[in-house]
Image: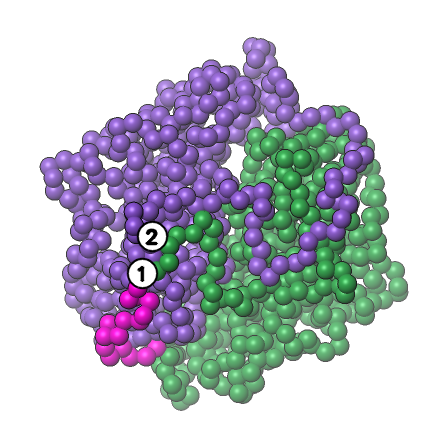
Chain colours: A green, B purple
Amino acid sequence: MEERDKAKIAELAGGVAAGNGLLDRRSLLRAGVLAAGIAGIGAGVAQAAESVGADAPEWMKTPGRSFSPYGMPSKWQEKVQRSFTLLPGRPGTGTSRTPLHLLEGTLTPNGLHFERHHNGVPDIDPNRHELVIHGLVKRPLAFSVETLMRYPMESQIHFVECSGNSGSFNQREPQQTTAGGLNGLLSCSEWTGVRLATLLGEAEVNREAKWVIAEGADAVAMSRSVPLEKCLDDAMIALYQNGEAIRPEQGYPMRLLLPGFEGNMNVKWLRRLKVMNEPVNARDETSHYTELMPNGKARQYMFLQGVKSAIIKPSFGMNMKGPGFYEVSGLAWSGSGRVSKVEVSADGGKSWAAAALTPPVLSKALTRFRLAWQWDGRPSTLMSRATDEKGEVQPTRSVWVSQYSPIQFYHFNGIQGWSIEADGTVKHVYV
Amino acid sequence: MEERDKAKIAELAGGVAAGNGLLDRRSLLRAGVLAAGIAGIGAGVAQAAESVGADAPEWMKTPGRSFSPYGMPSKWQEKVQRSFTLLPGRPGTGTSRTPLHLLEGTLTPNGLHFERHHNGVPDIDPNRHELVIHGLVKRPLAFSVETLMRYPMESQIHFVECSGNSGSFNQREPQQTTAGGLNGLLSCSEWTGVRLATLLGEAEVNREAKWVIAEGADAVAMSRSVPLEKCLDDAMIALYQNGEAIRPEQGYPMRLLLPGFEGNMNVKWLRRLKVMNEPVNARDETSHYTELMPNGKARQYMFLQGVKSAIIKPSFGMNMKGPGFYEVSGLAWSGSGRVSKVEVSADGGKSWAAAALTPPVLSKALTRFRLAWQWDGRPSTLMSRATDEKGEVQPTRSVWVSQYSPIQFYHFNGIQGWSIEADGTVKHVYV
């Protein structure tokens, strides 16, 4: 690209925001930037329309198909699927990942919400399922689904993230896979249900109570110890997900939702909450879901998902189509509250520019960030760095790795990066 | 219920907010209200839990099913479907409705978004589809799907409502059907795509331009005239719906989104935007989608969907289970911006109480409202009345009806009501 073209783009864009072509985030709203930026590349992007309507496509020449009781995605989108990692010989144990690299916005369609099961998805008859609250309470209670439906409800948009998400970042070499492959144990939904504090209030928790043991109705009776304080704060018995009944893979007919806490604690198929004065050291908080330290000791009960971000566009598998204008976009989130800032670097961390955050920026929800980038065609390294409202900032990967044993992989939230080669290939790199 | 129980409930709830048992909206967050209110009814709601874990259900005794590439709702939810109203002999012409009465929260799952097709759903090859912008522009342009993907995107949560929604309210007698049957040509999604102003800026609209004619790639080439002002305001070329590619029924691979304007104008399968200095009087803005007045003349180009609300819980088909505590909840929306207030009456409009609005309250999006109600078991009439940020308030049905010819049914936004009989039956009544 000519220097004068670059200068024109920078002028139209309201200025350069950081090194290697990152434009001011306000540029997104100004007409003319794209005309200059995109038309500046060799082939052009939008084609001039010479004539219109002469050749109606065949789908305009016959009536389309009829209505459907429950719709599905277009057949042209059949590759937009969850990808599996399963234990050999155990078809119900493993994970499936949300294809973040094929999605946009911030919400996850229910059919693509990530899965983590420890012994498959139980087929629960909602008419026979009960949630029991017992232990250190004055009034042990059992709630049918129908009963819970009569309680006051609330809706909250929150992400759920497996604490093993992005676990491959503990490996020596960066895994060459998509943004969804790296970070897809992460989804975001509007959850609707009953505030747990309301139910605990009805049961009347005793003074010595400190923990609540949540148990699922799957074949492993997945159990976790949850601090009572969290249960009385923003915990929810979720019955609906993005408007409809919660899906089987997410806990039908109900799950525990602990906004910002590691996914495993958001116990699915919830059947029991036992109020206690200590945690139970359940299998999934001793043999799993702990943080192994360099000295061989493990830290238990590290619940919060840290502040984190990932650039989704561009990412591995998306080849750049020559120099010119691109939008860099991605997702940021924090288990502690709202994302307050996302910075993007196009020069491997030498300089940073603030990205625009798509409103509404909600607490413990995925936030989409966007920034305009004029790529000059030279090798570049893109990175993103999120800060949350508590002031927490993503560490570098090397700082994160240095805290733990080399085999510990839970709770990775280090800064991630993609390299862009001169031919447009996008690779995963450690930064 | 005893008078002393009622007094205790009112005290715990922070007071009565309006006649016939409507409680203060802050009561939802106070423990003790439900214990008093629900335990106060004959049968009790939550059952005392005597023993736990003795009888594990059979779904805990065998491994569950494996992972799925694209998930579906539970088989126990198979009745949660869209319901159809089709023209005889024309399987692609008619409507399907979102079952609002079976959903919760504010978002509509993509599989249940309402449909309105004029000649079926075309099967469009996204690799061959183009959006052309031409007419009164300096540079006519054609955009492939791939090209549009390179443009800066934005995400907005907005409702889409057919202007014929709630059309049966023009009938003499109230239709006895569900809240979804009455109001289900209404859905709400997170839409992601390219702001239309960006593309029009690239094409460079001439000074004399005033209208944009939008044409769909279905077999009727659905066309509507849109004021240029709207196209330069918040209009979007939507490519994604709740995170994934827009569904075939909603316009795959792209639709026009005109937030707050009647559904029909949000042209699906969008292929052409012709910039003009006048509207074209297309079939669907002359023979349909006009407002017939008492004098026989029709008003054209009434685009905005008015401020509106409907109580969803309770509603027709949901029988009350005896006197006691209930949550009244429903949806409110306005094509002009944010809902600022929803009032609920339990005594047929004699007194009103402000409902709680679930945050975030977004512009031109569905807003869930909720209010606690202590039903004393006597016949009652529930109503809701929404006000938007422009100060517009829902009219009564009789005021609305008096404006039009008796056969006009577009844009109904009058106040709706449900009667509760002494035996708990919920009926649709005009109020």
Give the residue furthest to the top: B3
A336 up-or-down from B392: above or below: below
**Subunit that carries the residue with mark 1:** A
Tell me the quadrant of the picture where the C terminus of chain B can be found: top left
Left or right of B224 in this view: A388? right
Q: Determine crowd level at label 1: few under 14, some 14-19, many 20+ residues with C-alpha closer than 10 A.
A: many
Q: Are marks 1 and 2 in contact (CB under 8 Å)?
A: yes
Magenta segment boundaries in residue numbering: A46-63
Give the residue furthest to the front: B89
Q: Residue at x 33, y 67 (%)?
A: A59
Q: Residue at x 66, y 64 (%)?
A: A84
As drawn, the label of residue A44 is: none
Q: Is residue A310 visible?
A: yes
Q: CA distance from mark 1 to mark 2?
A: 9 Å
Was residue A191 drawn as part of the magenta stretch in this picture?
A: no
Give the residue furthest to the bottom: A2
Comparing A195 with B58, the one in front is B58
Amino acid type at mark 2: Pro
Disc 2: which residue: B91
